[in-house]
Image (cartoon, rainbow, N blue to C red):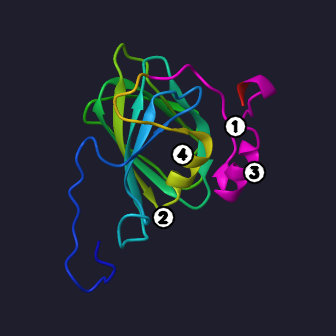
Amino acid sequence: MNERHNEPWWAVIGPEEGESIWQPLPSRGYIDLKLTPDNSPYDGFSVGTQLLPPGCQVREHGHRRNHELIFIHKGSGRVEIEGNDYEVSVGSTVLFGRYARHIIENTGNEDMELFWVFLPPGLEHWFRGIGRKRRRGEPMPEAFPRPEGVEELMEWMRFVPPANPPVDSEK
């Protein structure tokens, strides 16, 4: 990795490369971190992929200081943004700007795979804080809940809370 910004730098990251993290309910599936300030000389964004199994979702949230861009490259589902529903499928691109509460749900019969960009970076801290390390090729673990104390991490990350916060059993 070239730490100097005035010299050429590049990265080619294969599909089986990058830190991989299992996700808790209701997302399940996993995240692959591809580019973050930890492995590139750039501190303005982080990039990764996410696999959402059928029937799973990224629960409602928003970001006070970040923009989140996703591109669906496999599967189908819906996104809800500030109460508005949109169907998404292969080739759909969605930008969640600051403060826009959103949900991503796989309503299809196959895994939904998406590519995401987070500006400025930081989403990698969230995934590490709520998930479990994944070894490539291992079977999906039994469903597991978010860890205790996730509210403090959400505040540190400056998340916008859900419009209707979950009851204790859904946290």
How far apart are the alpha carbons under marks 1 and 4? Answer: 11 Å
Q: In this image, 131 relative to 93: left or right?
A: right
How far apart are the alpha carbons under marks 4 and 3? Answer: 14 Å
Kindly indicate the quadrant of the structure image that contains residue 7.
bottom left
In front: 70, or 20? 20
In front: 139, or 116? 139
**Mark 3 vs mark 2: in front:** 3
**Under tag 4, what secondary structure?**
helix
10 Å neighbourhood of mark 3: few (<14), some, or many (≥20)?
few
Amino acid type, mark 4: Phe
How far apart are the alpha carbons under marks 1 and 2? Answer: 25 Å
Identity of the residue drawn at 48% across and 61% down: 121
Amino acid type, mark 1: Pro
How far apart are the alpha carbons under marks 4 and 2? Answer: 15 Å
Q: Mark 2 points at which residue?
A: 120
For marks 1 and 4, the one nearer the N-term is 4
The label number, if any, that marks residue 152 in the structure image? 3
Amino acid type, mark 3: Glu
**Quadrant of image for the N terminus:** bottom left
Q: Name the residue under label 4.
A: 127
- Rendering coords of residue 15 (x, y %): 25, 42
Identity of the residue drawn at 45% across and 28% down: 29
Amino acid type, mark 2: Pro
**Under tag 1, what secondary structure?**
loop
Q: In this image, 82 relative to 76: left or right?
A: right
**Under tag 2, what secondary structure?**
loop
- Rendering coords of residue 40 (x, y %): 35, 67
Q: Name the residue under label 1.
A: 147
**Mark 1 vs mark 2: in front:** 1
- The segment highlighted magenta reads 140-169
